[in-house]
Amino acid sequence: MAMSGVFGTLRRRWYLVLAGLLLTAGLTAGAAVLFQPSYTARGLVLLIPPVDAETATGSNPFLGLGGLDLPARVLVASYSSNAAQQDIAKRAPDAEVTVSMEESTRGPVIAVDVKDSSAKGALGLLDYVSSSIPETLQRLQSEVGAPPSTTVTSIPLTMDTEAEVDRSDSMRMIILAAGAGVGLTVLMIFVVESLGTRPALRRRGAPTEPLMPAAGSGPELEVLPLLRAAPADPRPAARTTTPGAAGGAFDD
């Protein structure tokens, strides 16, 4: 369909366009109310080698970080267990908590990412999970019977003091709602336009029937076929001679 035809359809169905705009505005407003922006907070925790390793490397704990990658990954895996997830869900059922290795660094750095519906909730949950890391680390080492002098400890490396607003989910739902409103508007216009043009097409394409006079409304005319006489043969008839009884001939 040409652009002129599209604009003509929109002008004819302006009331549907207006209704579609109101519908789209209502859907987007509802999505904005139902899907509020979330808040994120992030913290980094560094694992520290045991005292014996510090002594062997000159009492500098940062020099012994190279061998702590495995304990850090074991600690991260413990937070993906059902017990840890249920404990976090009891505190904040709607929050999302991710404990992972900070791959941007080469050391045993653990990242704690929290997303919640409020800034206060996100910061509080970040503090709760980060504070549980030393206890969890101590419990894991005691379960394998590690001597106290060889236990790995942890220190907070950096913690967010203000939560950041995350509008990605809210904007995604608003865009989906707006797209649904526009799609419903186009569908309504298409259906109404199809129903409106169908009778006109039927009238234009209907075959014309011959007008026959109604019975008894007037004298009936009987059309007789015209009989055409065959043209006479212009050639003269041939004469035949029949022999007579006395040997003569008779002309017909």
Image (cartoon, rainbow, N blue to C red):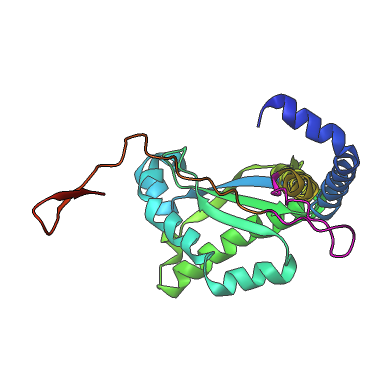
**Residue depicted at 62% across the width and 62% down the height:** 132
Q: Residue furthest left?
A: 247
Question: What secondary structure is the stretch in magenta mostly built from?
Answer: loop
Percent x, y of residue 159: 67, 43
Percent x, y of residue 104: 47, 37
Q: Is residue 76 above or below residue 89?
A: above
Of 33 and 219, nearer the camera is 219
- Give the left or right position of residue 135, taking residue 181 as reference: left
**Residue depicted at 62% across the width and 50% down the height:** 113
Q: Residue furthest top?
A: 4
Of 148 and 115, nearer the camera is 115
Q: Is residue 109 above or below residue 124?
A: above
Quarter location, residue 143:
bottom left
- Give the left or right position of residue 83, taking residue 8 as reference: left
Magenta-drawn stretch contains 83: no
**Residue depicted at 55% across the width and 73% down the height:** 82
Of 137 and 198, nearer the camera is 198
Percent x, y of residue 175: 73, 43
Q: In which quadrant is the N terminus drawn?
A: top right
Quarter location, residue 63:
top left
Examine the rendering and report whether any part of residue 177 can be seen. Answer: no
Segment colored magenta: 205-223
